[in-house]
Image (spheres, grey):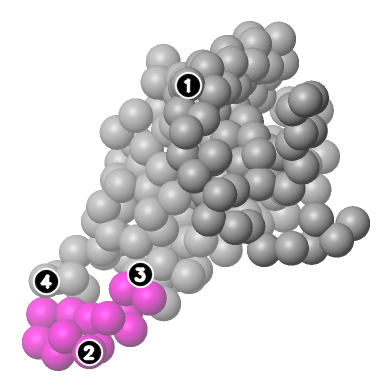
Amino acid sequence: MNYLLTPPSLNDLIRLLKAWRFWMLGAILGALLGAAVYYIAPPPFRAKATVNVDFNLEEALPTDTDRQHFYYLERESRKMEEIAWSDELMDSLSSEFGFSAEELRGGKLQLSQPAEAGWHFYAEDKDAKTADLLASAWAEAFIAKVQADIESGNINEFVKLEATQAKNLPKERSIPLSGYLLAGAVGFLIVAVFAVLFVKPKPLGR
């Protein structure tokens, strides 16, 4: 117990540095372990749909200041972000795909870049086709709802939306293989460092 609580000595650090072959082998073994986990229990697929949002500042606020432009963008973006996560859209997707609204909001769906230009609608699922259809359906439902709110006056009439990527979406694993390789290698090295520094070596027999 006293050995575990004692700070590493200079000899301990030297012994740690001398074990470079052990670190190299351990990093390789850790990376192989990470690769094995990746292929045995792979992360879900992630599909991305993109909707281009143009707030048309020049037409909506032709004579206003930059500060007023900022508040306009923030206000309209917040309204549209609330639409993206609204009960209406979540319930619609839940009915179509069989996922609960809590599951959709809990990580299966992700929204990126809620500002001017491209809004990215991500969907994750263990089945690549389901992820593709879910992301596409979310983006299309978002466009339809925002356009309806534009007609009703809830969203500024100068806001324009276009689905720039809503069919045959790019799909990839939510965590790449390289992430598993790095995590395995780093994890092994951390464990090995503690083992070398805090496990007292046995003295050689005389």
Local crowd size for mark 1, using a 10 Å CA cut-off: few (<14), some (14–19), many (≥20): few
The image position of residue 114, as x and y in percent, is: 41, 58
Q: SS of the residue at dot 4? A: helix
Q: SS of the residue at dot 2? A: helix
Query: What span is colored magenta in the figure?
Result: 61-74
Q: Is residue 66 magenta?
A: yes
Splitting the image into 4 quarters, where does residue 155 fall? bottom left
Q: Nearer the viewer, residue 203 or 155?
A: 203
Q: Nearer the viewer, residue 15 or 57?
A: 15
Q: Which amino acid is tagged 1?
A: Arg
Residue 176 visible, this orientation: no
Local crowd size for mark 3, using a 10 Å CA cut-off: few (<14), some (14–19), many (≥20): some
Q: Nearer the viewer, residue 9 or 75?
A: 9
Residue 115 visible, this orientation: yes
Splitting the image into 4 quarters, where does residue 192 fall? top right
Local crowd size for mark 4, using a 10 Å CA cut-off: few (<14), some (14–19), many (≥20): few
* Disc marking residue 67: 2
Q: Which residue is mark 4?
A: 58
The image position of residue 78, as x and y in percent, is: 47, 70
Sequence order check, earlier mark of 3 and 1: 1
Q: Quadrant of the C terminus?
A: top right
Q: Which residue is mark 3?
A: 156
Mark 4 or 2: in front is 2
Q: Which amino acid is tagged 4?
A: Glu
Q: Which residue is mark 1?
A: 21
Q: Disc 1 to disc 4, how far (Cα)? A: 64 Å
Residue appearing at x 58%, y 35% in the figure: 189
Residue appearing at x 85%, y 61% in the figure: 2
Q: Quadrant of the N terminus?
A: bottom right
Q: Disc 3 to disc 1, how far (Cα)? A: 65 Å
Q: Disc 3 to disc 2, how far (Cα)? A: 18 Å
Q: Nearer the viewer, residue 21 or 77?
A: 21
